[in-house]
Image (cartoon, rainbow, N blue to C red):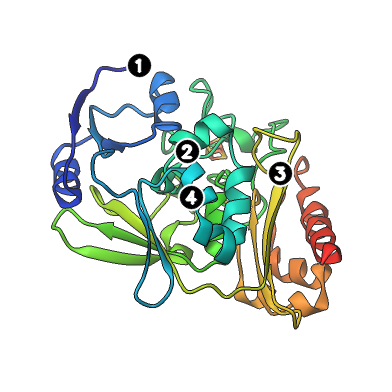
Amino acid sequence: MRAFSYERATDPAAAAARAAQVPGAKFIAGGTNLLDLMKLEIETPVHLIDVNGLGLDEITRTDDGGLRIGALVRNTDLAANDLVRRDYAVLTRALVAGASGQLRNKATTAGNLLQRTRCPYFYDTAQACNKRSPGTGCAALGKGAFSRQLGIVGTSDACIATHPSDMAVALRVLDAVVETVTPTGATRKIPLAEFYRLPGDTPDKETVLASGEIITAVALPPSIGGRQSYYKTRDRASYAFALVSVALIRQPDGTGRVALGGVGPVPWRRAEADAELPRGAQAVMARLLEGARPTEENAFKIPLAERTLAAMLAEE
Ligand code: SF4
């Protein structure tokens, strides 16, 4: 691990200003992903700004009847919150499907959104990776590469990595909005639908956050009710990332919303696919995965996504 300096922040705007001031600075909260990346020297921050003292650890009602989740609310506390369990059950289900109990106790809401891909070549510094080292190439696209876990939609010739978060898939289906403070002290509200960037030629740039900008909360609109479920298909029953995951909200009249995890660089949802829900899983996936570019190793994700949604619809 490379040497770094450290400070504790006490105010979000000051923390943002400080991060913009010090080149190579990073925020740290739970550290469940960042510390691993630092040990492997994939992330090499010269300065860490500990944000655990910012007091952003509450879940409160918003004026419009929605919910504001502080950036530092731990995944365990968010999953167990009574209002979340009652009104946003898809979020609780996604959270408990992610990681392990120990990790959920430490991982924060903002950190979960900002975790990096688990592409095996991203973690192997002997391999080419445009996301880790821009311009070096993509080992996952090489002949015979291991791409079973990687993306099929929204990918590019530079990167086919997936976003690993389960929580983000549920937040996407709930139309969540990310709230931030910039280094000038201004606040921004960014719909989660616009928060992540597609890789294009610059897979190292994963979000629309500006340098130093800090997430303070995630806001949920008032609950739309319905039957809310999350199903994660993976190679083993726990502590594994999704091959395909499905977040589903279904109303009694058959309408609803669907988002997918494990298939692309961002939580994957399309309004035109939501509109196909009354016609069943095949119609939804035809829209949702239109234009998919799987590799030979991960083409199975297309029928797997359809069958996962079909199984969920059959349960209702
Ligand atoms: Fe790196 Fe993306 Fe290629 Fe994986 S898929 S090796 S993260 S560029």
| SS state under label 3 | loop
Decide: is 255 above or below 36: below
- Which is more foreground, mark 4 or mark 2? 4
Label 4 within 8 A of ligand 1 by Cβ: no
The image quadrant of residue 42 is top left
Q: CA distance from mark 2 to mark 3?
A: 22 Å
The residue indicated by pointer 3 is: 243
Picture residue at 59% right of the left edge, 33% below the top? 100
Q: In the displayed structure, does residue 281 sit left or right of residue 267? A: right
Q: CA distance from mark 2 to mark 1?
A: 22 Å
Q: Amino acid at mark 1?
A: Met
Q: Is residue 129 visible?
A: no
Residue 79 - label: none
Q: CA distance from mark 3 to mark 1?
A: 31 Å
Picture residue at 57% right of the left edge, 29% below the top? 121
Badge 2 crowding class, 10 Å Cα cut-off, few under 14, some 14 to 19, many 20 or more, is many
- Sequence-wise, the earlier of marks 4 and 2 is 4
